[in-house]
């Protein structure tokens, strides 16, 4: 088939027939199916016959097409294998039971006998089991146990025996440059030095005496809240992947919210407990490995 006429007029191959239309199929002996027809066909029988034709008539083309499809999907999933490693991996995931050679596997992918989206979860799991020990990962320390009292870990002008609270406007973490503000009745509020609520020039501000020097102890031993904003492609399972990754790192989640943007992306805002700025960097690095995440920033 090379085309069709509806009521005497040539129409695209994906034209939807309407009641009363007279359809004439235009054919030529030398013509053969097109791979794009699989996406247009509505019946399983038609799709099966197109795949069968490619399976028997275009093996070399199928192998090339299938390898390209596998390479693209593996790259998207973060699976990096050279040709030799791919051959070994092919054996380890028991594909050998169904296909005699790696080329047979590529050919099956190429003509549509294998749908990658169905087998990718198993392939990715096997890849991580086999090669995880060889992949350099950032070591993320376990988050500390949450405590009700969070005043320890900060020294105020040489005296740590003072009520300390961490400001919600900037949520300082160990490693951040900090400063204290003496409040009325609530001890000392700790801010990041670059917080918008901290005057740039303390000498020119009102009541400069209420701003005091503060520094972190070497071993803070506390859990600190930090809020992250994640920009990602909106897809099914995004929030599940984020929470599973955090759970694997033993990260406590306080709040998690998401909203859909008009451009097909999603914004996820999440507040978690971390041990400090270095710990947070490791958490961000691990979250960045999740499929579809484009940007993560600390709020």
Image (tube, grey):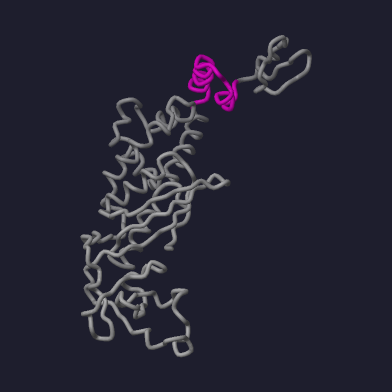
User: Residue 281 appears at what percent x and percent y?
Assistant: 35, 63
* Quarter location, residue 153: bottom left
The verdict on residue 63 being magenta is no
Please state which of residues 52 and 275 is positioned toward the viewer in this rendering: 275
User: Residue 231 appears at what percent x and percent y?
Assistant: 48, 53
* On-image quarter of the N terminus: top right
Q: Main secondary structure of the magenta part?
A: helix
Residue at 46% over, 81% down: 199
* Quarter location, residue 117: top left
Please state which of residues 11 and 208 is positioned toward the viewer in this rendering: 208
Please state which of residues 140 and 90 is positioned toward the viewer in this rendering: 140
Task: Write the start and end of the magenta stretch as one range.
Answer: 33-59
* On-image quarter of the C terminus: bottom left
User: Residue 294 appears at what percent x and percent y?
Assistant: 48, 53
**Looking at the picture, does residue 38 appear above or below residue 146?**
above
Q: How many marks?
A: 0
Q: In the displayed structure, does residue 213 sit left or right of residue 229? A: left
* Quarter location, residue 71: top left
Residue at the extreme front: 185
**Looking at the picture, does residue 267 appear above or below residue 122?**
below
Residue at 39% over, 74% down: 192
User: Residue 177 appears at what percent x and percent y?
Assistant: 37, 77
**Looking at the picture, does residue 35 appear above or below residue 136?**
above
The verdict on residue 42 being magenta is yes
Please state which of residues 90 and 197 is positioned toward the viewer in this rendering: 197
Residue at 59% over, 24% down: 40
């Amino acid at each position: 088939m090379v085309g069709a006429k509806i009521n005497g007029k040539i129409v695209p191959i994906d034209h939807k027939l309407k009641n009363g239309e007279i359809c004439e199929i235009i054919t030529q002996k030398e013509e053969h199916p097109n791979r794009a027809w699989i996406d247009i066909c509505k019946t399983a029988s038609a799709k099966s016959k197109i795949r069968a034709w490619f399976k028997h008539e275009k093996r070399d083309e199928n192998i090339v097409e299938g390898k390209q499809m596998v390479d693209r999907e593996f790259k998207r999933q973060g699976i990096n294998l050279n040709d030799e490693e791919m051959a070994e991996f092919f054996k380890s995931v028991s594909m050998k039971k169904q296909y005699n050679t790696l080329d047979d596997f590529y050919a099956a992918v190429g003509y549509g006998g294998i749908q990658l989206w169905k087998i990718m979860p198993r392939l990715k799991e096997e890849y991580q089991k086999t090669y995880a020990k060889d992949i350099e990962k950032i070591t993320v320390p376990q988050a500390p146990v949450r405590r009700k009292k969070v005043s320890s870990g900060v020294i105020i002008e040489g005296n740590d025996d003072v009520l300390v609270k961490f400001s919600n406007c900037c949520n300082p973490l160990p490693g951040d440059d900090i400063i204290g503000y003496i409040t009325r009745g609530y001890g000392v509020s700790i801010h990041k030095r670059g917080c918008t609520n901290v005057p740039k020039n303390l000498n020119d501000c009102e009541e400069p005496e209420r701003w005091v020097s503060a520094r972190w102890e070497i071993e803070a031993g506390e859990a600190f809240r930090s809020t992250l904003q994640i920009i990602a492609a909106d897809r099914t399972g995004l929030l599940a992947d984020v929470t599973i990754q955090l759970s694997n790192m033993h990260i406590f989640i306080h709040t998690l919210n998401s909203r859909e943007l008009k451009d097909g992306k999603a914004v996820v805002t999440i507040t978690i407990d971390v041990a400090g700025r270095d710990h947070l960097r490791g958490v961000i690095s691990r979250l960045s490995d999740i499929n579809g995440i484009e940007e993560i920033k600390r709020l």
